[in-house]
Image: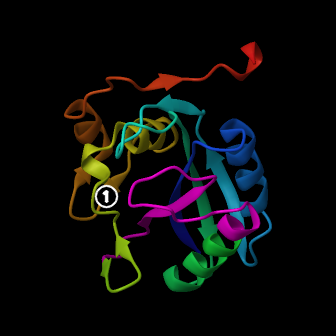
C-alpha cells in the first residue's frame, strides 16, 4: 500500500458540501482506504481575485493503485461533482490534487508529484501538517519546516459546529 495525500478545494455550489461529498467519494475508490482527513479551511483565491474564497482540506489515503490510475479516479469524482475548467486557477466546484504519493517523484505530461507549488500554498501545507506532522516530502523536506516558512495569511480553520 502507498501512502498518498490528496488536496481538495472548492469555491462553487456550496463548497463545504462539495468537499465533504468528495471525501465520502474518495472512500469508494477501489483498492483504496481513507486513513485521515484534516479540518476544513477557508482561503482566498490563489488566481484571479474576482472569484469566491475556497474551502480546502487534505486527506491521507492508502492505495494499491498507481499514481496515474488514482488520478483517473480523482478526475471521475471531479466530473461527478460538476467540475468545469473555465480558466487557469479559476473557480471550480471541485479540485482534487495528488500532493504526495509515497516517496515517488513523478514529472510527466499528466502528473507532477510532489505537487510543484505546495511549498507556497498555506491551504495545502497547514491541513497537511495537521494530519502528517512528521511527513518528509521528496524534493521539499520536512512538513514542519515548510509550514514555518509559509505565511498563514488569509487561511482560517472552519468550525463546522458553527455552520
Q: Position of residue 103 (x, y in %)?
A: 36, 71
Q: How is the image coloured?
A: rainbow
74 lies left or right of 154: right
The magenta stretch is 77-105
Q: Quadrant of the C terminus?
A: top right
Dot 1: what SS? strand
Q: Position of residue 30 (x, y in %)?
A: 76, 78
- Can you say which quadrant of the picture contains the N terminus? bottom right
Task: Name the residue: 31% across, 54% down.
Answer: 136
Residue 141 position (above or below residue 33): above
Query: Residue at position x 63%, y 44% from top?
Result: 12
Report x, y in % for residue 113: 35, 71
How dense is the environment of label 1, judged by Cα within 10 Å: few (below 14), some, or many (20 and up)? Answer: many
Residue 48 spot, x, y in % from top left: 36, 44
Find out whether residue 97 is within the magenta segment: yes
Tell me, yes or no, whether the highlighted magenta stretch contains residue 1: no
The residue wearing badge 1 is 137
Q: Residue at x 58, y 39 (%)?
A: 38
Horizontal side of residue 15 vs 100, given as left or right: right
**Predominant secondary structure in magenta?**
loop
| Res 50 quadrant in image | top left
The image quadrant of residue 14 is: top right
The correct choice, above or below, for 37 with respect to 137 in the image is: above
Q: Nearer the viewer, residue 62 or 161?
A: 161
> For this rendering, which residue is in front, 52 or 81?
52
Please state which of residues 136 and 87 is positioned toward the viewer in this rendering. Answer: 87
Amino acid at each position: 500500500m502507498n501512502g498518498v495525500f490528496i488536496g481538495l478545494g472548492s469555491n462553487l455550489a456550496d463548497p463545504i458540501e462539495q468537499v465533504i461529498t468528495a471525501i465520502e467519494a474518495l472512500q469508494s475508490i477501489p483498492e483504496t482506504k481513507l486513513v485521515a482527513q484534516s479540518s476544513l479551511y477557508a482561503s482566498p483565491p490563489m488566481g484571479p481575485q474576482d472569484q469566491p474564497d475556497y474551502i480546502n482540506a487534505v486527506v491521507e489515503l492508502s492505495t494499491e493503485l498507481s499514481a496515474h490510475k488514482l488520478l483517473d479516479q480523482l478526475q471521475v469524482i471531479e466530473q461527478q461533482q460538476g467540475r468545469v475548467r473555465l480558466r487557469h486557477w479559476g473557480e471550480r466546484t471541485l479540485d482534487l490534487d495528488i500532493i504526495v504519493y509515497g516517496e515517488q517523484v513523478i514529472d510527466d505530461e499528466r502528473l507532477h508529484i510532489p505537487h510543484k507549488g505546495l511549498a507556497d500554498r498555506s491551504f495545502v501545507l497547514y491541513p497537511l501538517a495537521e494530519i502528517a506532522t512528521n511527513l518528509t516530502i521528496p524534493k521539499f523536506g520536512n512538513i514542519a519546516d515548510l509550514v514555518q516558512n509559509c505565511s498563514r495569511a488569509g487561511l482560517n480553520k472552519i468550525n463546522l459546529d458553527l455552520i
